[in-house]
């Protein structure tokens, strides 16, 4: 428990807080994850976030984030040590350690409508990338974004990910088959650049 508290403290910057979701021991509970799912739907973000499976249920999302190969980080706004609102979240999925010499995963982001402003997205984008490489010790993070989601592509590129491939007809968005844009950032690239 002490490690969780230390990480929570280290992930605070003024009124902004980055907390890892730790099932059963962290500040956020399974109920909070289900509430986030409800908010994603109410704000019309569900189909963009879960673009390959918009019929996914909140229970399936909860199971996804309870899987140790998927690590969720929640961005929050605080006031005097109390969480007052959730700004958004980021997660690494399909985390794999390759032959003990490299750890890789697929990164994703979402911000709630009121917080889709550079004062939040820029701060948290750089912050979570730092967290992935410094705290989680990732070596390489990939993103796979529908080519038609231009706002998301611009955002991940501002976070320092570089386009490395386009795969024709790889994914779906809004009931259409679209190209998938593969982006990537390595720990070395992140450490040698200052982005956002």
Image: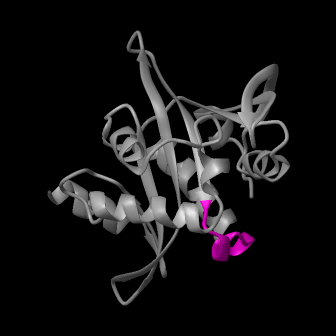
What residue is at 61 percent from the left and 48 percent from the top? Answer: 49
Q: Position of residue 59 (x, y in %)?
A: 35, 47
What residue is at 27 percent from the left and 66 percent from the top? Answer: 27
Which residue of the protein is positioned furthest toward the top in this rendering?
Answer: 99
117 in relation to 49, above or below: below
Q: Is residue 29 magenta?
A: no
Q: Position of residue 43 (x, y in %)?
A: 62, 68
- Quadrant of residue 193 in the image? top right
Q: Is residue 183 left or right of residue 18?
A: right
- Quadrant of residue 143 in the image? top right
Q: Position of residue 20 (x, y in %)?
A: 37, 55
Q: Is residue 112 magenta?
A: yes
What residue is at 56 percent from the left and 61 percent from the top? Answer: 41
Which residue of the protein is positioned furthest toward the left in this rendering?
Answer: 1
Which residue is at the front of the view, 142 or 190? 142
Which residue of the protein is positioned furthest toward the bottom in this rendering?
Answer: 80
What residue is at 21 percent from the left and 55 percent from the top? Answer: 3
Which residue is at the front of the view, 86 or 178? 178
Which residue is at the front of the view, 17 or 189? 17
Q: Quadrant of the C terminus?
A: bottom right
141 in relation to 113, above or below: above
Q: Is residue 31 left or right of residue 191?
A: left
Q: Is residue 154 left or right of residue 21?
A: right
Question: Which span of residues is magenta-colored?
Answer: 111-119
């Amino acid at each position: 428990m002490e490690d969780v508290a230390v990480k929570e403290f280290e992930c605070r910057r003024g009124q902004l807080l980055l907390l890892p979701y730790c099932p059963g021991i962290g500040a956020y509970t399974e109920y909070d994850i289900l509430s986030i799912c409800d908010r994603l739907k109410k704000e019309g973000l569900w189909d963009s976030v879960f673009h390959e499976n918009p019929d996914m249920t909140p229970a399936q999302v909860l199971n996804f984030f309870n899987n140790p190969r998927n690590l969720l980080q929640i961005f929050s706004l605080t006031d005097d040590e109390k969480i007052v609102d959730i700004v958004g979240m980021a997660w690494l999925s399909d985390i794999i350690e390759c032959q003990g010499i490299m750890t890789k995963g697929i990164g994703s982001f979402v911000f709630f409508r009121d917080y889709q402003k550079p004062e939040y997205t820029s701060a948290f984008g750089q912050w979570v990338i730092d967290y992935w490489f410094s705290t989680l010790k990732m070596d390489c993070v990939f993103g796979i974004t529908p080519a038609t989601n231009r706002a998301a592509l611009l955002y991940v590129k501002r976070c320092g990910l570089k386009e490395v491939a386009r795969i024709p007809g790889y994914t779906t968005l809004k009931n259409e088959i679209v190209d998938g844009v593969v982006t990537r950032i390595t720990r070395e690239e992140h450490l040698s650049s200052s982005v956002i």
